[in-house]
Image (tube, rainbow, N blue to C red):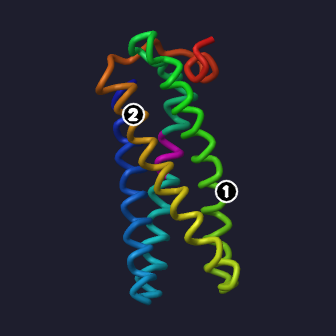
Amino acid sequence: MATFLPFISTIFIAASGVFVAIGWYLIAKRKIEAHKKAMFWAAVLASVFFITYLSKTFFIGSTAFGGPDEIRVYYTIFLLFHIVLATIAAVLGIWSLITGYKNKLSVHRRLGPITSVIWFISASSGVVVYLLLYVIYPPGETTNIWRAILGL
């Protein structure tokens, strides 16, 4: 179960990133209704990711980096970069959805492209974090979130 939930949550965030890319393509083609549907599903998939991520974190714990000590600092910097981007993407994503659904299109048109890029990079870097934690290197210990992130 400790590796199953991260795999599932990674599938959801990767799919979310794909829907963001599709939504961007659709709006460039002026397919507004299809764009709305794609971005709605991107948000739903990101929400399911967040629920599965929180479930694993609360009920099982967080996985520490199990790779070599020589690259731990690089992993930690990358992870912190991912966490900051994911937080920004979540806030901007909610704001973008609200402005889009409320037809505040002047704000939405400025915010949407920025949000999409950050969201896509966040989703992509999340997949890389999963690969580093569970595929490329063996998982480290299961611990609290701060010890897993900072190695304390």
The picture quadrant where one finds residue 69 is top left
| Callout 1 touching callout 2 (CB < 8 Å) | no
Of the pair 101 and 56, the residue shown nearer to us: 101
Q: Secondary structure at mark 1?
A: helix
Residue 51: in magenta span: yes
Q: Which residue is mark 2?
A: 130
Q: CA distance from mark 1 to mark 2?
A: 22 Å
Seen in the picture, residue 152 relative to 92 is either above or below; the reply is above
Residue 77 is situated, as x and y percent measured from the top left of the image, at: 56, 29
Residue 34 or residue 121, whichever sits in front: 121
Residue 71: give its label. Answer: none
Mark closer to the chain start, 1 or 2: 1
Identify which residue is drawn at 44% across, 66% down: 41
Residue 57: x percent and y percent?
Answer: 54, 29
Q: Which amino acid does the dot numbered 2 rest on?
A: Tyr
Residue displayed at 44% across by 73% down: 24
Q: Which residues are magenta?
A: 48-52
Amino acid type shown at disc 1: Val
Magenta portion: prevailing SS class: helix
Percent position of residue 123, x then y: 45, 49
Q: Is residue 78 left or right of residue 7?
A: right
Residue 65 in the image: above or below residue 14: above
Q: Quadrant of the N terminus?
A: top left
Is disc 2 surrounded by few (<14), some (14 to 19) or many (20+) residues within 10 Å? Answer: some
Quadrant assignment, res 140: top left
* Dot 2: element: helix
Q: Which mark is residue 91?
A: 1
